[in-house]
Image (spheres, grey):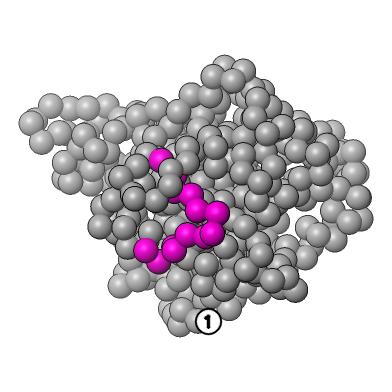
Amino acid sequence: MIYKKTKNINLDETNGVIKEDKTGEITICENCEMQLDKVKEFENLSSRDLSILKTPRRILNVNYPVKMDDGSVKVINAFRIQYNDSLGPTKGGIRFHPEVNQEEVAELAFLMSLKTSLVGLPYGGAKGGIRINPQSLSLSELEEVSRGYVKEMFRFIGPKKDIPAPDVNTNPQIMVWMMDEYERIAGEKSPESFTGKPVSLGGSLGRNESTARGLFYILEEKYKNQNKKNLEVAIQGFGNAGSKIAELLFNIGFKIIAVSDSSSGVYSKKGLSIDELIMFKKKGGKFIDHDGEKITNKEILELDVDLLIPAALGGVITKNNANRVKAKIIAELANAPLSPGADSILSKKGTEVIPDILANSGGVIVSYFEWVQNIQGYYWSEDEVNQKLKTKILDAYNVILEQAQKYNLNLNIN
């Protein structure tokens, strides 16, 4: 890779905080390079192919002025990295965070390139970042930052070039501002230029829960012949994706024995009432204040369970704690929750891993559906969206199972 980082960046889905990994693990982008080198052992990739896959296609780094409410001018630093466009226009979210950096964005764009290819979408991979603290900005300032980003990137984005979407600290409202600015410059309506919009302005039904629902369909298929009541599950992270996968699994009989948010975790060997915990969180509660038995975020990763779902932080399982992880199967709902060192240890232990590029691909699949609906001007029911998502992600799941069996590999290709 062209980037070599001195620290890992970890993302907490529950609060959007990026944290430094002090464990001395191999850097994330070096991990991408290592994984590509492993693929070369099984596929006849030429040196040319590897060079292309290891290098971002386009790196955009811009600085633009924004007038603040008090009349001062703040210069905003922003990125867009379009990693690979071999399969079609690039696709990926935009995150707002004061510590977002070029290498983090490059690594996420790389993963998105793998993800769109794996699930058979006509997309390449991209990612964007704006180095700001959105909590420190007024609504009008946030709008100016959002519109300014589109002004800077306009020549390089669009429905046939690169389609942005929400990510950390961005939301449907920000996508509306960006889409409106794009349409103003282009001089025409273009709802397909951005995804993750409100349903009333061209967004897709089913998008909000699609990341969790995609993993649910995989797990439903995987465990279809087993008694769900005997399957114990632990979920680290209770944000949008974590709480939804907990609800979906709970509703078909899985025993969820532990969940956590950024404050603490709740544990019950007999099984938790997920409906009650969801209501508790909707009222603004934190698990540290819940009446149930407490468990730490560290301890939840080391429970002896059938299924562990890291759904919040990246890099939470490392070479330092992988030997203590007892879960039979790990489903990576978060982005890159396993470090390179952990991958190797878990593989030797025989732990099965459902990798993030498959496990959390439901979000980009339904973003693709939104793009298609916008182009057609014809919108689907939520049931139709969910059924198409199920078909798409299970097709990809079966392909990856066939490849793993063909090469006698674990799902995480280790």
Q: Secondary structure at mark 1?
A: helix
The type of residue carrying mark 1 is Glu
Q: Which residues are magenta?
A: 264-276
Q: Is residue 401 left or right of residue 341?
A: right
272 in the magenta segment: yes
Position of the C terminus, as image quadrant, is top right
For disc 1, the neighbor class at 10 Å (few under 14, some 14 to 19, many from 20) is: few
x 27%, y 27%: residue = 75
Q: Is residue 186 left or right of residue 380?
A: left
Disc 1: which residue:
384
Q: Is residue 162 left or right of residue 353?
A: left
Q: Is residue 109 left or right of residue 97?
A: right
Q: Is residue 147 above or below residue 51?
A: below
- Could you say where residue 86 lies in the image, as x and y percent from the top left? 68, 50
Specify whether residue 264 is in view.
yes
Position of the N terminus, as image quadrant, is top right
Which of 203 and 168 lies nearest the eye of the viewer? 168
Specify whether residue 58 is in view.
no
Which of 374 and 297 lies nearest the eye of the viewer? 297
x 75%, y 38%: residue = 346
x 8%, y 31%: residue = 70
Q: Is residue 339 above or below residue 194?
A: above
